[in-house]
Image: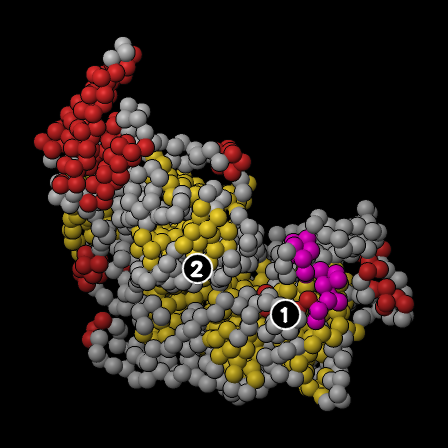
């Protein structure tokens, strides 16, 4: 996907100055850390952000027509409305305004079928642009319209107002065209080259003809050598010429000159090669990076007047959370290259080679992991797939900023904008600050303040999915390192020189705001001559005894009074502290936390776990009492038919209750309309349904239901289950990834994305199954997602469940019907498909006397009461068996008496369960038993 970017106008940056130290925290933090006013962050999701400043306001524009603004680069506010049309915030009537580009790609076509694909805009102020009214100066938006991985177009629109509306001017670059008539799947667009602007350029003499090399031997587009027309970026060179770089994967990144008065491309007109052997194409321009289908996108060039270099930023790898996205940089003394890295390697690849060694890697996947005993909360601080950046230079402040989007560990495909300050090291290369920008600036550093333990990240040069976790490295007072072989040195006021294993890294020492501990502390960032970046974040000075005691105090296993799932037993704490475990009953709970529940009816088990915490000579011991619940039978837990009420047809659980617009409030109203079978529940967009707690309490389950939405709103849930408000599963018709329908889970974020959006005003069937972390999602009987690693959310017996509402988002508006919830059962694909086609409920189990007896054995702790109830049920069953015998013998009077006796015994059992509810039988279990007894008494023959 694609781009972003920004202009280097002179801007005045409002910095957040951090105030002097406070002693409030005592020795909790090192003496050289200063305490400041906490910065305020308001985050936004703008993919491929392109940055610009207008007045005192910073703007980012990105993919899917998203935009946000800020006065401080920390607190952002969205001002766009995505693909809404008409009434689009930036383009008005989107379809009509960009119609010329959409003739080629990007609207209701192929990969964008049913919607739009407008990606990676470049926002650019051009003081030379000649407007239609004769005035000069306009904001120019160079956007990408795309339908496949190669069929794309770059167009531009202009406005005198930074927030629009923008008016279409021209489409200047096309890709993915073919020699002869051809069509992509789900497309009616003829891809032949003469449907692009190339025919017009030939007709007016700009080009003499097509180039044979544009096409493979079969007439298809040669995307191994030529670009995908997305990810535009504009910049002025030192002579005042305007240039555009663009491209993504395919044949690489290209550059060509732009007429600064019209915004149109100045095509080379003829083919050739540069003096260093790079391709010059009559239409596409000059190749400056990549090629051979290798990853590399989001080019961004910035000229540094002081260094006299053009810096080319490129992101390599796949962009998703499970991808390899990482940012790299090259430089050149000429706008059209050659661009080289710190090793002197050309950014244009020499062939179909491994391209991970090319380019200085600024950052990739990383995690400064927080272990037990470390300050702060959560898992720590880290990014996944940071990239597609723009760069902003503030001449007045002398500050430069790297602006990009990133995903995060354990947060799925959720992405947000981040801004990090850039610094030029002594070798003339940019290095990025380890933390996001909060107003910090370079200042004189005292050497004494540097020494200490650091969490250390080496970003390497790889293009991989590996999440690089920090290790501990000590910068000793004598200039040596511990935890790595090498040395460190403070050069001048703040320059850092770190040598590790014979490799020297040059960068800066910098005080930054640490958002994990909410303090300011020392950091460093540096780059080697091989283009490898390293980061360090100073930790708090503590003795081994202090660390062990902190770990003992913080070590917790959560609620251990009703354990039904494996326990996570940490084996390492802060600063490499070791934690070992012993179990009093390894067959039930092992020293690794593996839980084996007693079989149904065997009763619960109690186990003691002992943790031994060791660092150096310091040791502490902590014990935990674990109660492991016996297993329960796998079954269809509930079947809500919504036939005029919220009752469960199986009678296993209680009826649902109406809520207001959130899961935890009241005041709503549910009505009933035409369902997929009989009636369905009609949600008004202001109400929801709270279901009984504990419907699912395992990592094997299935959920199935029908939906008919009146409207689709962002993040709105339909089926919602949560262990806590941070650990949940949600079926979202319009999710955070391309507005597609998905099963979403947090906070160990997971997106089970169907890659489609269910329609409004018609019925769709949704089902999902989870089997020990493997998830399958079905829409209308078709498997739309299959993945592994799905979070184990329902690890307690009291998880909350709701329909149409959660803790945060707008409620669902529309109809819902035939909700099936299975615990311990994973439906097969064939079962889901059969149910969709026939309506035959999979594995339906109706309440029976035998089933009630099984439940009583599980739910009633008092043996006297338990045995008495079971005996009465056995006697009732004996009466019904006798009734059948009498009927077969023609003794109707005796049969009636036996039937009467049986029903009286059943009614007595029901009454006794009601009496013991909340006393000898847990209230929720009693409600289930009562519902089952009512079903037996009212809806079926007792012997069944």
Identify the residue at horizontal 51%, vertical 51% (top origin). 708
Instruction: Please check the rendered image and state whether residue 99 is part of the magenta-colored stretch, yes or no.
Output: yes
Q: Which residue is mark 1?
A: 86
What span is in magenta? 96-113
752 relative position to 720: left or right:
right
In the image, farthest residue toward the left: 864
Image height of 575 relative to 495, above or below: above
Q: Which residue is mark 2?
A: 684
Using the image as rendered, state which of residue 751 and residue 769 is in the foreground: 769
889 relative position to 11: left or right:
left
Identify the residue at horizontal 88%, vertical 66% (top origin). 202
Q: Horizontal and vertical percent for residue 200?
A: 86, 67
Identify the residue at horizontal 16%, vertical 33% (top origin). 908
Using the image as rendered, state which of residue 649 and residue 545 is in the foreground: 649
Q: Is residue 746 visible to us here?
A: no
Instruction: Please check the rendered image and state whether residue 225 is part of the magenta-colored stretch, yes or no.
Output: no
Q: Horizontal and vertical percent for residue 773?
A: 40, 43
Secondary element at tag 1: loop
Colour option used: secondary structure
The C terminus is located in which quarter? top left
């Amino acid at each position: 996907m694609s781009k972003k970017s920004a202009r280097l106008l002179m801007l005045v940056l409002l910095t957040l100055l951090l105030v002097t130290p406070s002693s409030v925290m005592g020795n909790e933090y090192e003496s050289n850390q200063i305490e400041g006013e906490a910065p305020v962050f308001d985050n936004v999701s703008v993919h491929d952000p392109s940055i610009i400043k207008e007045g005192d306001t910073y703007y980012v524009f990105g993919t899917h027509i998203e935009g946000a603004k800020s006065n401080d680069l920390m607190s952002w506010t969205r001002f766009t409305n995505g693909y809404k049309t008409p009434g689009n915030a930036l383009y008005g009537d989107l379809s009509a305004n960009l119609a010329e580009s959409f003739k080629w790609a990007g609207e209701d076509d192929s990969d964008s079928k049913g919607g739009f694909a407008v990606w990676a805009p470049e926002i650019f102020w051009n003081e030379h642009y000649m407007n239609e009214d004769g005035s000069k100066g306009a904001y120019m938006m160079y956007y990408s319209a795309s339908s496949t991985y190669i069929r794309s177009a770059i167009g531009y629109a202009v406005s005198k107002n930074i927030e629009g509306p923008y008016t279409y001017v021209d489409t200047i670059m096309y890709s993915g065209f073919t020699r002869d008539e051809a069509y992509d799947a789900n497309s009616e667009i003829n891809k032949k080259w003469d449907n692009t602007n190339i025919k017009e350029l030939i007709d007016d003499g700009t080009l003499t003809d097509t180039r044979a090399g544009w096409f493979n031997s079969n007439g298809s587009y040669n995307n191994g050598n030529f670009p995908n027309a997305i990810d535009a970026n504009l910049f002025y060179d030192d002579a005042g010429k305007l240039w555009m770089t663009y491209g993504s994967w395919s044949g690489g990144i290209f550059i060509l000159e732009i007429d600064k008065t019209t915004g149109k491309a100045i095509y080379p007109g003829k083919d050739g090669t540069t003096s260093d052997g790079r391709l010059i194409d009559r239409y596409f321009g000059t190749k400056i990076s990549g090629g051979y289908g290798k990853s590399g996108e989001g080019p961004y060039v910035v000229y540094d007047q002081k260094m006299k270099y053009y810096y080319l930023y490129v992101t390599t790898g796949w962009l998703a959370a499970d991808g390899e996205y990482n940012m790299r940089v090259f430089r050149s003394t000429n706008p059209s290259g050659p661009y080289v890295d710190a090793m002197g390697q050309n950014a244009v690849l020499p062939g179909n080679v491994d391209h991970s060694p090319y380019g200085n890697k600024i950052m990739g996947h990383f995690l400064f992991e927080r272990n037990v005993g470390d300050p702060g909360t959560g898992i720590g601080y880290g990014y996944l797939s940071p990239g597609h950046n723009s760069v902003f230079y503030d001449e007045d402040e002398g500050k430069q900023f790297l602006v990009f989007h990133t995903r995060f560990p354990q947060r799925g495909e959720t992405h947000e904008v981040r801004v990090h300050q850039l610094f030029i090291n002594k070798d003339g290369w940019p290095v990025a600050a380890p933390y996001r920008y909060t107003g910090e600036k370079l200042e004189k550093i005292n050497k004494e303040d540097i020494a200490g333990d650091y969490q250390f990240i080496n970003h390497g040069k790889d293009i991989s999915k590996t999440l690089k976790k920090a290790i501990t490295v000590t910068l000793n007072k004598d200039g040596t390192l511990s935890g790595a072989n090498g040395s460190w040195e403070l050069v001048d006021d703040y320059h850092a020189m770190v040598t590790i294993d014979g490799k020297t890294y040059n960068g800066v020492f910098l005080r930054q705001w640490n958002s994990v501990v909410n303090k300011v502390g020392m950091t460093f960032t540096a780059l080697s001559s091989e283009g490898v970046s390293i980061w360090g974040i100073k930790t708090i000075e503590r003795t081994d005894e202090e660390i062990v005691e902190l770990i003992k105090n913080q070590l917790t296993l959560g609620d251990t009074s009703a354990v039904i799932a494996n326990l996570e037993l940490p084996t390492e704490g802060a600063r490499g502290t070791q934690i070992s475990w012993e179990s009093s009953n390894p067959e039930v709970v092992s020293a690794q936390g593996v839980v084996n529940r007693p079989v149904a009816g065997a009763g619960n088990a109690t186990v003691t776990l002992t943790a031994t915490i060791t660092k150096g000579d310091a040791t502490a011991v902590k014990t935990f009492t674990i109660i492991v619940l016996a297993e329960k039978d796998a079954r269809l837990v509930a079947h809500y038919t919504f036939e005029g009420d919220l009752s469960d047809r199986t009678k296993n659980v209680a009826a649902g209750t109406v809520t207001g617009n959130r899961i935890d409030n009241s005041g709503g109203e549910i009505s009933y309309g035409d369902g997929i079978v009989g009636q369905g529940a009609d949600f008004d967009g202001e109400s929801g349904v709270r279901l009984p707690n504990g419907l699912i309490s395992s990592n094997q389950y299935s959920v199935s239901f029908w939906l008919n939405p009146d409207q689709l709103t962002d993040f709105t849930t339909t089926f919602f289950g949560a262990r806590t408000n941070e650990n949940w599963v949600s079926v979202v018709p319009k999710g955070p990834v391309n507005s597609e329908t998905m099963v979403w889970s947090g906070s160990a974020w997971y997106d089970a994305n169907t890659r489609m959006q269910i329609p409004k005003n018609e019925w769709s069937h949704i089902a999902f199954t989870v089997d020990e972390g493997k998830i399958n999602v079905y829409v209308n009987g078709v498997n739309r997602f299959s993945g592994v690693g799905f979070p184990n959310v329902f690890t307690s017996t009291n998880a909350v469940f709701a329909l149409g509402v959660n803790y945060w988002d707008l409620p669902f508006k529309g109809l819902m019907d035939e909700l099936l919830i299975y615990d311990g059962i994973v439906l097969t694909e064939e079962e889901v498909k059969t149910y969709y086609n026939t309506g035959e409920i999979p594995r339906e189990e109706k309440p029976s006397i035998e089933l009630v007896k099984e439940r009583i054995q599980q739910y009633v702790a008092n043996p006297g009461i338990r045995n008495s109830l079971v005996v009465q049920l056995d006697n009732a069953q004996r009466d019904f068996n006798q009734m059948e015998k009498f009927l077969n013998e023609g003794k109707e009077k005796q049969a009636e008496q036996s039937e009467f006796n049986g029903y009286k015994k059943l009614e007595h059992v029901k009454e006794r369960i009601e009496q013991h509810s909340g006393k000898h039988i847990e209230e929720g279990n009693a409600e289930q038993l009562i519902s089952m007894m009512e079903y037996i008494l009212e809806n079926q023959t007792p012997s069944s």
